[in-house]
Image (tube, rainbow, N blue to C red):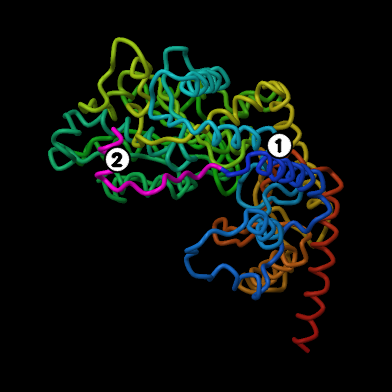
């Protein structure tokens, strides 16, 4: 062997492991100490801070060619990265729908990265952890033990997985072999005009095209209109199309509206359609003591998408798709190339999780969820969900009590849509006023809201999916909106003279 090495002129061997392990241990301990302080003191920092130009410029440096001391690198992170987050761990971050992470989950991510397992499958502990987390998710939403599931990056991919299984089951052909061009009749999917934009991306990715997704009008409370849905299904059948799937909202992205899941399950059964529930916002209401009644019927779905990085507050990212028919789920994605053959003993005897989704290389997302659920118990997460809903209702009542503020939609769960409303201004001027309030709240570091438009009416949107939020934070939000609105109103009135 020495002669072979000599003949190859092998260079000195290198590794990425530290030269000085005790020094690395000291650095790692300092990182953890700073991380604990970062979350402990999060309330004392702005909800969001714009990055100064000189700091932004530091991220344009060229590719590093030579090594740099780790201490200097971590100092740069501490000074230039940590002060400028998106902000969703802050108690007054209510934009979009994020979840607010937790310390134990962050430790889980760190440990998972240290172990470095690939969750494509195999006989190792990480696979068992993921299987258990999926089983727990099934129990949370009332799915049968024999159902299957997959942890993915988030709601968009979880919905894509569910809709892919729906397409393949309802195609009437072996669509994996023949493709969508062989369909005898074009497939049609149905969802309300309030479904998330990821569903359009999904049907386009599936080769069906945006026209395959029919948006059905929603009612006064932003739920899918069942009569209009039935009429659309009948119309499509008469036109020679193939109705395939209903996409139900368990928490619509704009307002939190929840479709009548019981009625949709009955309709899907009658029409022989797949029922997919987009529960990325609201499916986990099923674990809330008071909120679970809002998602009655969820357990009847053929597939459900949910996001542990929202109301389970796992660090980004982790989503989940559950599929009632495990065989159909596996048949949609499974392949068995020669380099991934099972073996009678050893590493290749375990489950191949890649057979249930698109990725062969998959990170160990499950550990952070597993650790957090073990530490706190599912009942506490359920109480936190009810707490967020109560806080949203409190905000709605404060808005109703202020003449200058107006609710734009009911708040069935934890999303509140409202605006600073001046009756004598046109819609464009009201929008400009509210956008300016939203931006000043962000720039002042007070709170982070998003905005949307509901049936032509622009509004601010507070999505209170945050275990750190307190009622005092909501009081502060309303006070600041009234202060900023009054200030801007004086400017508007003054310029009109």
Residue 217: x and y, percent? 45, 46
Residue 419: x and y, percent? 70, 60
Q: Residue furthest top?
A: 344
Does residue 392 appear in the picture of this structure?
Answer: no
Residue situated in front as seen by the camera: 94 or 8: 8
Q: Quadrant of residue 392?
A: top right
Q: Is residue 361 left or right of residue 126?
A: left
Residue 358: x and y, percent? 34, 36
Report the residue at 32% width, 31% height from top. 166
As displayed, is residue 86 above or below residue 4?
Answer: below
Report the residue at 59% width, 36% height from top. 109
Report the residue at 30% width, 22% height from top. 328
* Magenta range: 1-17
Residue situated in front as seen by the camera: 342 or 93: 342
Residue 203: x and y, percent? 32, 45
Q: Nearer the viewer, mark 2 or mark 1?
A: 2
Residue situated in front as seen by the camera: 240 or 172: 172
Residue situated in front as seen by the camera: 189 or 5: 5
Secondary structure of the residue carrying numbered label 1: helix
Q: Quadrant of residue 347?
A: top left
Which residue does the numbered mark 2 point to in the structure image?
A: 5
Q: CA distance from mark 2 to mark 1?
A: 48 Å
Q: Quadrant of residue 271?
A: top left
**Residue 103 — which label?**
1
């Amino acid at each position: 062997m020495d002669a072979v090495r000599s003949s190859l002129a092998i260079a000195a061997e290198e590794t990425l492991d530290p030269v000085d392990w005790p020094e690395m241990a000291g650095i790692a301990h300092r990182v953890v100490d700073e991380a604990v302080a970062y979350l402990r003191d999060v309330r004392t920092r702005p909800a969001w801070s714009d990055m100064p130009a000189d700091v932004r410029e530091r991220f344009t440096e060229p590719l590093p060619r030579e090594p740099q001391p780790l201490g200097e690198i971590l100092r740069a992170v501490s000074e230039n990265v940590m002060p400028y987050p998106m902000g969703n761990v802050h108690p007054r971050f209510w934009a979009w729908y994020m979840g607010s992470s937790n310390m134990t989950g962050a430790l889980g991510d760190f440990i998972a990265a240290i172990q470095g397992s690939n969750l494509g499958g195999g006989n190792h502990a990480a696979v068992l952890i993921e299987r258990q987390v999926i089983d727990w998710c099934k129990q949370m939403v009332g799915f049968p033990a024999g159902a299957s599931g997959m942890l993915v990056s988030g709601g968009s991919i979880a919905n894509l997985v569910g809709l892919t299984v729906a397409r393949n089951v309802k195609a009437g052909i072996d669509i994996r072999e023949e493709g969508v061009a062989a369909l005898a009749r074009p497939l049609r999917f149905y969802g309300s005009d309030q479904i998330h934009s990821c569903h359009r991306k999904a049907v386009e990715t599936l080769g069906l095209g945006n026209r395959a997704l029919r948006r059905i009008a929603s009612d006064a409370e932003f739920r899918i209109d069942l009569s209009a849905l039935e009429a659309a299904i009948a119309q499509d059948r008469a036109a020679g199309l193939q109705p395939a799937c209903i996409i139900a909202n368990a928490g619509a992205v704009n307002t939190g509206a929840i479709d009548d899941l019981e009625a949709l399950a009955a309709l899907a059964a009658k029409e022989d359609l797949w029922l997919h529930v987009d529960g990325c916002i609201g499916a986990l209401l099923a674990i809330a003591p008071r909120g679970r009644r809002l998602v009655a019927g969820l357990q009847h779905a053929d597939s459900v998408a949910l996001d542990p990085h929202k109301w389970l507050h796992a660090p980004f990212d982790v989503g989940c798709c559950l599929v009632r028919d495990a065989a159909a789920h596996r048949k949609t994605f499974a392949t068995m190339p020669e380099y991934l053959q099972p073996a009678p003993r050893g590493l290749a005897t375990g489950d191949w999780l890649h057979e249930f989704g698109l990725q062969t290389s998959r990170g160990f997302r499950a550990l952070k969820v597993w650790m957090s659920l073990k530490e706190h118990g599912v009942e506490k997460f359920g109480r936190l969900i009810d707490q967020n809903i109560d806080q949203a209702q409190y905000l709605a009542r404060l808005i109703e009590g202020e003449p200058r503020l107006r609710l734009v939609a009911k708040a069935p769960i934890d999303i509140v849509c409202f605006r600073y409303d001046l009756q004598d201004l046109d819609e464009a001027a009201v929008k400009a006023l509210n956008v300016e309030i939203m931006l000043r709240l962000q720039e002042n570091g007070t709170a982070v809201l998003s905005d949307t438009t509901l049936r032509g009416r622009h509004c601010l949107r507070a999505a209170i999916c945050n275990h750190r939020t307190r009622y005092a934070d909501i009081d502060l939000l309303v006070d600041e909106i009234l202060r900023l609105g009054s200030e801007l109103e004086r400017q508007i009135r003054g310029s009109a003279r």
